[in-house]
Amino acid sequence: MLRFWFSIPLWQRVIAALVLGIVTGLLWGPEAASIKWIGDFFIKSIKMLVVPLIFVSIVAGVASIGDLRKLGEVGWRALLLFVVTGQIAVWLGLGLGTLFAPGEGIDTSAIQRGPTPQPNETSAVDMILSIVPESPVAVMADAQVLPLIVFALLIGIGIVMAKEEGQSVARLFDGGAAVMQKVTMVVMELTPFGVFALMAWVAGTLGQDALVALAKLVALNYLGCLLIIGVMYTAMIRLLAKLPVQHFFRGIVDAMAVAYSTASSNATLPVTLRCTQRNLGVSRPTSSFVVSLGATINMDGTAMYLGLATLFGAQIFGVDLSFGDYLLISVLATLGSVGAAGIPGSGLIMMALVFGAVGVPLETIAFVAGVDRIMDMMRTATNVTGDAAVTTAVAVMTGEIDREEMISADDV
Ligand code: ASP
């Protein structure tokens, strides 16, 4: 029985759980709320992974480059591309959410609402100060991702500066990253149960209108991701890297497929590395650094989704957003995508960061969580494609690519 269960690919079990959950909810009605705790259990388990995963993977990624000058040369270009593409992606999500209004017209009075988060009155200076971790331990305990990233980058740089002496620590983090990926795989096994319970709850308490709204959200998530891949990354490869687009996509199709089925940029990392090095001809140090960093901080699919989902939450709960709120969302969604770990469902967790700032009820998270997996798969494929596109563009700009190898890689 157990063997049969594990012989079915996880994504197929998740889709089956989704359908079963909807049917159960529609038949069972509001009583289905009694199993929502299973979904909460699942969401909590994902949250548990976020801090250790971000920390070890960024330290390991930075440490792997091994040379400070190279780190700077490659690093600033990669960061600039990460930020610019992230911003374009969020505004795309906000545009799609405004244009198609997927959350308009559902009655959410059956959802028990906790206190609505108050919009934060943080100034720009407060925001800058908040990225410096006063106490790294407190930052970890409170899961504050941005200061955590800063701390992790510094530790990585320290390891590089310590050269030989730092090697034992570097190996520790390398091992830690591998262990955390395995732990992630274990937690992912909870997904079918969480998805089943959450879908039964949504369908049971809110009925068909809610399902139609969720279907629209899923469709817009796919449309947004396809636009990012088909327009933004294609332009980056053509105009910045000046390489043939079809070679690029042929070179990374394996990584895209693994990303789609695992919904984890981190789990896909070994495949993305292999594709960028072997199929695209990017040098090993550059690809290790940019791809590992990108797997954690470059998530355009997630950024787009955070913009879209915030509008969705505002629409279903009738929260009015001003243009100032849109600007705040654009900054926070980019930061949220930076802070999201490359594991399944982390985009979902990052919603709290954005929602809190503009007063969108946190109940939206549980509401969309049941369909998150299907959207996550597409977001992750987009994120991984973005990592490979930025890595390739930066490699071309810094002369770290073997063009011959790429052009001749017809048999990839
Ligand atoms: N699962 C995504 C990734 O690994 C992040 C997300 O949830 O959007 O890239």
Image (cartoon, grey):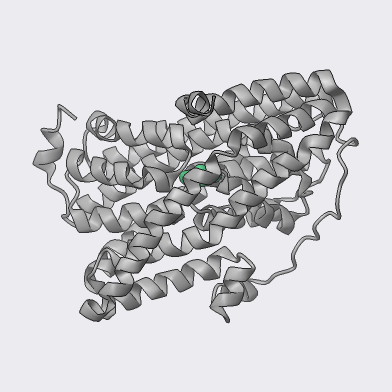
Furthest residue toward front:
1
Q: Quadrant of residue 192?
A: top right
Residue 359 is left or right of residue 72, and the answer is: right
Residue 172 is left or right of residue 183, and the answer is: left
User: Does 71 sit above or below residue 37?
Assistant: below
User: Does 278 sit above or below residue 176?
Assistant: above
Q: Position of residue 333 (x, y in %)?
A: 59, 52
Could one spot residue 76 in this view of the protein? no
Residue positioned 67% across, 54% down in the render: 354
Residue 64 is left or right of residue 7, and the answer is: left
Residue 75 is left or right of residue 98, and the answer is: left
Residue positioned 41% across, 48% down in the render: 266
Depth check: give the residue in front, 176 or 330: 176
User: Does 104 sit above or below residue 165?
Assistant: above
Q: Position of residue 177 (x, y in %)?
A: 39, 58
Residue positioned 27% across, 81% down in the render: 162
